[in-house]
Amino acid sequence: MALAKTGRIAEADALFGKLLEKKPARVKILQSAIHFHNRYSRHARRALPLVTDLLKARPDAAQTHALAAETYANCSRFPLAKFHADRATTLAPDDPDTLFIAAYAYLQASDFAPALDLISHALQLAPDHQQARLQKGRALLGLGDTDGAVSIARGLWQEKRDDINTIGLFIDAAKLQGDDPILVYMRDTLLPAYRDIGGAPLAHLLKLLGKAHNDFGDYHAALDYFDQAKAAQPLQYDDKRYAAFVDAQCKAISRADYFGKGTDHDSPALIIGMPRSGSTLLEQILAAHPEIASAGESPSLNVIVQDIGVRTHHGGDITRAIQQIPAEAIRRFAQRYLDETRQGDERWTIDKSLHNFELLGFFATMFPKARILHMMRDPMDTCVSCYMQNLSAWHRYTQSLDTLGHAYVQYRRLMDHWETALPNPMMTMQYEDLVTDTETQARAAIDFLGLEWDPACLDFQNNSNRSMTLSARQVREPLYTTSMQRWRRYEPHLAPLKKRLARFYPDGLSSDEKGG
């Protein structure tokens, strides 16, 4: 652990490997190794078998269940994470560290109300716990209390000005002005120091600066900060591998692959598309209906596909899984997906994990009757917004405007294929139409789900459902049209993207045209 704390991760990992060779491993070693993989190596999946061993060795210890909750949360296995969080807090109801980890598990699952209750209890016991206060800010933001989140962030910043996580909460919750003391400190004090550090820390700070400048309208500076962030932490996007992944499904998967397959369950409904396509708005409108619940961006489908050995963006693996998976396995995985996403007794459960568009072929083997809502937005607006967001490293296609354009073309190609190859009912919705004629579009979506119209769908800003996506703040604001054609603010810098996306604008992309 001393090696890990000084950044010598590989050496620490090697030592833990030697310590774990002896079977059964000592409880203290299991606990330390699980902690290491969750907090230092960041390979939480490697902690999963260690959690299993620890649960067998010490099943009635609060620390065991806390470590299990943290591990399962980091592996996106949220039902198990919440189960062990509850078990841990039952065993140690007044231990601040246990409450903190339990709250973390609920936060990762976007279940904000229980997370807030847990962390509030922890802070009653340990009011000066800085990370717990930060966690409370995140829970408040998820619940739509931006003022509360901003207040916590400002208070924490006054105490510890260099904490990037505190600054990140503030940037997510507030719209800064150019003279805000936090922004001035980021730009004049932190940025020079971070340039000496470089790498991921510098990239993170640059993205926060970019978002802040974009919020108050300094668009050219915002784009420049994001350009610098990509250069500080370059991510390798394999365009050939991704195109081959799409090719394999387009060529090998057809409607014939679904004859006689799947379950009769039709209660899950997917919202899919590219990030920044307006999907959160659609989700919130639908989730305001009393017969619709939202599971948020559930990782369940992706985790199931991983668990059967499908490598990420591997065309051969995914097509074999679609065509060869046994009927019994289909039923088992379908039930697991339902168990992991179902929120209550509502008729429909919405899963808004957008990149499920890559896995629709497998989803249809389990649920050929499930409905799919495809959310689209102007291609240039979509891609520019993706480029200028602090997306995770998984979205490595956002490394450059060129690679982003390539990925967008592949996404459209795959969706064109699914529209003809899948047995599922599908509906395509356009963000611009949803903003300008909300009631008509909302009624059409509700009708697509076979439900009676409910006026609550137009009062979605006051709905108790929450969103942990990048649009968490916007979904509680009135509908606005300023996000349409926003790409033109940055047009002088967008030549590589315009070249890639020209095929979607048969009338051209000149400045005096609307595009779309």
Image (spheres, helix red, strand yellow):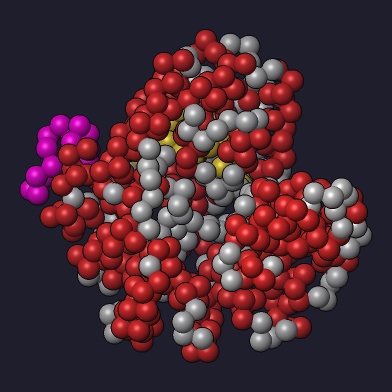
211 versus 336 height, above or below: below
Whether residue 436 is visible to the viewer of this picture, yes or no, is: no
33 versus 276 height, above or below: below
Determine the residue located farthest toward the bottom in the rendered image.
159
Percent x, y of residue 241: 40, 31
Closest to the observer: 104 or 4? 4
Percent x, y of residue 96: 76, 76
Percent x, y of residue 269: 56, 36
Write down the region rendered in magenta. 501-516
Assess whether residue 512 is covered by the magenta stretch.
yes
Horizontal side, residue 320 vs residue 434: left or right: right
Which quadrant would the N terminus be assigned to in this image? bottom right
Horizontal side, residue 264 vs residue 401: left or right: right
320 versus 489 height, above or below: above
Q: Which residue shows up at 44% across the image and 21% down it?
A: 248
Closest to the observer: 363 or 434? 363
Closest to the observer: 205 or 301? 205
Whether residue 366 is visible to the viewer of this picture, yes or no, is: yes
Horizontal side, residue 76 vs residue 161: left or right: right
| SS assignment for the magenta stretch, majority | loop
* Picture mark count: 0
Percent x, y of residue 302: 58, 38
Residue 308 picture quarter: top right
Which quadrant would the C terminus be assigned to in this image? top left
